[in-house]
Amino acid sequence: MLEKEHSEIQSQQPLANRVRAGIEALLYSSVFISLCAFGLTVETYLLTGNQVSLPMAGFVFLATLFTYNTSSLQRMWRGWRAGEAGQPWNIRHQRELAVLALLSLAGAVVLFFVYELRINLWFVLVLALISVGYTVPLARSRLKPFRSVPLLKVFLIALVWSAVTVLFPLIDAAVALDSSGMLLWLRRFLFILALALLFDIRDYTYDRRTRTLTFPGLLGENYTRFLSLGLLLLYLLLVLLTEEGEVLVSLLSAALVAGLIVWNASEEKPRIYYALLADGAMLVHFAFVYLAVS
């Protein structure tokens, strides 16, 4: 009997290892967060009553995937060797991530020109420079990445994400950027900013070691958490003023989920908490809206 139980446990371990490897690949290759960007882009079409453009949503997905893997391209360019066992997943697989980044860039370019997406190329390039410059210096000089500028990184994240997932689809759908469109952008900006503060909490020790001033360094972890909750309350206020019916309920529910994630965030939480839950709050946001309008 004991031998049978032992053999069953052994047979289950390879499956568990494969599942864990799959989850790691999904999260740390940035495919998951790119799916979040895809979902928020589709959500914008749904909230404004426009036909969903899958080429645009696919473009946002691929552009996000490229942006989040540019650090692997930089490491390969500088001649870093592949990581060894025990190092972070993205270091051990930096060669594959560099290839993924190049393929994503190529795919995004193809979608942009083949489907003639109606967004200004210069607007795209400016946001791309901000996104790449967030982690990678844009010139070989003493200039530091944008994330090293005191208190700036959370605003850059919220600005780029809200512009890409709201303004891109609205412009492509030829929707006038009037007060309702800008309120939608502001709502998304506040929601993303609230979540971005969680990553300041996660990186508090690293940022302190690199002497990068962030909100936890300025306010402390607890007050940064309260600031995030305050931003969610502002988001809720705008939602109450601009939505009604099932969509209103879905957005309120998404904000509640995000609030619970913020409330339980701390520096001691494992990285997967942020990769899966903090980022996943955006996917929950999309899912609730999709269920409300379908």
Image (cartoon, helix red, strand yellow):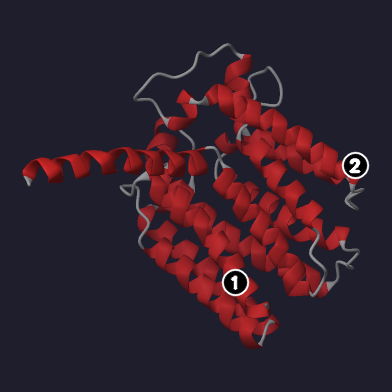
The kind of residue tagged 1 is: Tyr
Give the percent coordinates (x, y) of residue 14.
32, 37
Where does the image place residue 285, in percent across and percent down from the top left? 57, 67
Q: Amino acid at mark 2?
A: Phe
Q: Farthest residue toward the bottom?
A: 245
Position of residue 135 relative to residue 277, above or below, is: above
**Residue 100: which disc?**
none
Residue 282 in view, yes or no: yes
Mark number, residue 113:
2
> Which residue occupies 39% across, 51% down?
273
The picture quadrant where one finds residue 293 is bottom right
Labelled disc at residue 235: 1
Residue 126 placement, left or right of 267 = right
- Tell me which corner region of the image, top left, top right, bottom left or bottom right, holds residue 95: top right
Q: Quadrant of residue 135?
A: top right
- The x and y percentages for residue 73 are 63, 24
Q: Residue at x 79, y 70 (%)?
A: 181
As drawn, 235 above or below 94? below
Dot in front, 1 or 2: 2
Circle 1 packing at 10 Å, graded few (<14), some (14-19), many (20+), is: many
| In this view, 234 is above or below 96 | below
Q: Secondary structure at mark 1?
A: helix
Quadrant where the C terminus is found in the figure: bottom right
